[in-house]
Structure formats: structure tokens, C-alpha cells
Image: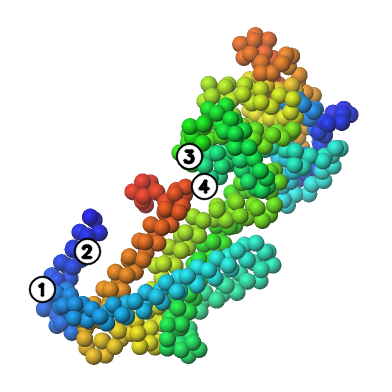
Amino acid sequence: MTMSPKQGDISIHIEQLTFDNMVLFNNLDFVMPEGQWTCLMGESGVGKSTLLRLVAGLVPEKTTTTITAADFGIEGEIAYMAQNDLLLPWLTVFENVVLGARLRGDAFSSERALDLLKQVNLLGSAHDLPATLSGGMRQRAALARTLMEDRPIVLMDEPFSALDTITRVRLQEFAAEMLRGRTVLLVTHDPLEAFRLADRIHVMSGRPAVLFEPIKPAGRPPRDMRDPELLAEQAKLLDQLANVKSAA
Amino acid sequence: MRPLIIAIGLFSAWQAVVLLTEVPFFILPSPMLVAVAMIEHADRLLEDGLVTFVEILGGLFLGIILGTASALIIGLFRPARQWLMPVMVVSQAIPVFALAPILVLWIGYGIGSKIAMATLIIYFPVTAALFDGLRRTNTGYLDLARTMNASRWSVLRHVRIPAAMPSFASGVRVATAVAPIGAIVGEWVGASHGLGALMLHSSGRTQIDVMFAALLVLAFMAILLYFSVDWLLRRLLTWSPDSLPSNDKVGL
């Protein structure tokens, strides 16, 4: 895949990444256009999360990695949301939402934190411990924490996968709205989610992993799930994913 | 309610053994005899109990402070870990009780050598538990903190230390349970005050009822201390699953 990144785009070139003598990436180029949602799909274990972690600067130890990236001065501009909500169990929901500022010793706006909690419908649980919340509530709290960071680049690893359908749809819409105009990388297993939210969808496959040319769904996210065109596109993507799997 | 029933049950069994076997009072005095001895020697028991209690608390305090400091040092500095960890593990091969006479020789017959003994016995469980807790911080938390540009110190203060607290609490519980052993062994080796000294003294004079009275006071003190510490730790760590009442746990 050759494309020259524009200023503001995030481009990452991975020379080689090896895990236990297994080459995961070899000469992989990946570009996230500025202000767009890039979705990463592909079967489990192919390296999606690893790629996201590399962008996040969480380079795994004990690997022979060479990362060079144009305009990779993105330290301090990233908000990261993992599969696991990673709420600190000894802090209240509110304290978890303002964790970033706490860790940096920065001042923060309590109003903004409470407003975000209100928007994810958790205002009533602001002073509860995470253990008292359901899985969906915890994930919403994690989303509020991610938004509280207010960073231009947002990296999310299957953030909605553990949620029930209704909550998921609601949170997708909310996230799409709140993160509009930011550079977002979303790892997901859900083609519908990808089609609702992404500006570009990359399918990753193989070992060493390669990225297919991105699919660019028409229209502005969040797209209506009932749109027949979107459903047809989704079917095509499913086919592509299935073919990749059977070829592998 | 349950502890009371257990206590009554144990005392009844004790009384029953004495009645049925007609064991002489200088081998096993009846609970009644011991109760009488307790009232008769209340002053001495209280005085010696207080000495032992201070020794236990002193040992707990020092042992926890030193153990915490060591765990932080070996947990945070890799060279310290590489050099000190083997020394610490090997040092555990020395039976701590064997050190008691040396401690008494160096520090004297007073309260100091007993506190040192209790400190020694407490130090390792606390160090090991806290170090283990610091080492096992959820890597997800650390990743998150890193993307939030947290400094090393900030991660330690806000993430690693709080995350290690349940493990540390287990260490403190073990320490509380073994602290009386340290104090009593110290007293046996050489002391004029304390419950251990009183037991040896009354044994020498075949005041077996007094000996048992001292033992009961010691047991009561140890149990009370353990449950107080346990209660306090639960109150402080309400967020930890360890703090749930044990009945709520699955299985054992």
C-alpha cells in the first residue's frame, strides 16, 4: 500500500515485529488520515490490537521492533481505550473519569467530568465504586474517561464488544458524535459497527499480516443501520473476511 | 454469637476431660482452677500482659515499616532486587528462633530484644506480600497510565501502590498472627517480665494454674489483635474482593 501521508495524518511504518520467532509484521505501512475514523478488522490474533498498541506507543518488550514513522510526534496526544474497561477498582467512577489529570497532576474541570458522566447516563453512579456497576456501565465509564482526556487521537480496542445491542448502538452514536473530527482508530470484530462508524475500513490478514486496500463507506457516520446499501456493503465485507479466513 | 458458642464448647470439653480422666491438677488444671488463678493473680497477669502486648505492637510496627521499605526498594530498583532478593530468601533458611539467644545477648533482657524478635519474624511476610503485590500490577493499568503520560512516580503513587494494597493486607494479617510468637520466644530465652516469662516462672514453681491463666490471656490478646487488624484492613480496603465477608466467597 503506497500513499503519501498528508501533514496531520498518522503514518506508521513497521520494519519488522517478531513475537516468539514468529514474524507478525514485515514492512507494514499504515496510515490514519487526520480527522477520520479508521477501522481495523480481521480474525483474532492477526495483530490488530498489536498495531493499535504500537500507535499508542505501547511497544511490547522483548521483540525485535523497528518503528519509524513520519510525523510520529504524537506522544501526549493520545487517548486509549482497551477491551477491558481498566477502571481502577479503588477509585470512584468520577475519580476514574478524571484519572488522566490526576496522574499528570493537572487541574481538571469537575463540571466537564460530571457532564460527560451525565451524557453516558452515569451521573447517579458518579460516587460509586466500579465493582458495583454492570459491565455496560463500566464500559460507559471508560468511554467517559477516554473523552475526558480530550485528545486529538483516540485509539479504541473493541470498546463496545461486551455491551448489549441497545447500549452498543447508543454508545456508538454517542462516541461518533463526541469524537467527530478526531483521528480515531477503532479495532472491531463487528462489521456493522465498522460500517456505521468508519470512514475507512481496513481488513488485516495473514502472517506476516498485510492490510487490504481500505473500504470507504459512503455517507457520514454514524450511518443508519437500516440503510439497505449499508447492509449490502456489510454482506460484502463479511464475504471478504470469510474468504480471507478460508484462504489462510 | 458463634464465637461465644465455640468458646463455651471448648471450655466444656476441657472441663469434661478433667472430670472424666481425673488428670492431676498439676498436669491439667480445670477451667475453674484457672479462673480462680486468673482472679488471684490479676495484677501480675495484667502487668505482664501489657509488657507482652507492647512487645507485639512494637514488633508489628517496626516489622511492617521495615518490610514496606524493603518491598518498595526491591520492587522499584532492579539492581536492588537482583542483589537483595536472593539474600532475603536464603536468610529465611535460618530458623528465626535460633537467633533469640543472640538477640538477648546483644540487646539485653529488656523489651528491646523481644521487639527485635517479633520484628524479625514479621519482616519477611510483609516484604514478600507487598513486593508480590507491586510486581503483579495489572499491565492494562500501566498501559493506560502510560498513554496518559503519567510519570514513574505518579504511576507508583496512584496505581502500583494502591493496587498492591490487598496483597499487602494479607501480609499484615500473617504478620499479626505470628507477632505474638516472636515476643513469647524472646521472653522464654531471657526476660523477667511478660507472659512468656510468667509462664516459665510459674512452671518452675509448679503453679500450673497460673501458667494456664497466662496462656489464656495471651490467646485472648492474640485473637483480639488479629480480629481488630482484620477489621481495620477490611474497612480500609472496601473496594477489594478480599474485604467481602467470607460467607460470600465461593467455595473455600
Q: Position of residue A217 (x, y in %)?
A: 73, 17
Which label lies toward us, 4 or 1? 4
Which structural element holds mark 2? helix
Give the chain letter at badge 2.
B
Which label lies toward us, 3 or 2? 3
Q: Is residue B48 above or below residue B7?
A: below
Residue B7 numbered mark, or none: 2
- Tag 4 near tag 3, CB within 8 Å: no
Q: What amino acid is labelled 1 in the image? A: Leu
Residue A90 numbered mark, or none: 4
Residue at 47% across / 59% down in the picture?
B169
Which structural element holds mark 3? loop
Q: Position of residue A137 (x, y in %)?
A: 51, 32
Apparent side of residue A64 relative to residue B181 in the rendered image (left or right): right
Apparent side of residue B178 relative to residue B73 in the rendered image (left or right): left
Q: Quadrant of residue B69?
A: bottom right
Which structural element holds mark 4? loop
What crowding class fits label 3: few (fewer than 14 Cα within 10 Å), some (14-19), or many (20 or more)?
Answer: some
Which structural element holds mark 1? helix
Q: Is residue A93 above or below residue B151?
A: above
| Marks 3/1: CA–CA distance | 59 Å
Residue at 42% across / 72% down in the picture?
B57
- Residues B47 and B217: in front is B47
| Marks 4/3: CA–CA distance | 10 Å
Q: Earlier in the sequence, mark 4 or mark 3?
A: 4
Q: Position of residue A216 (x, y in %)?
A: 76, 19
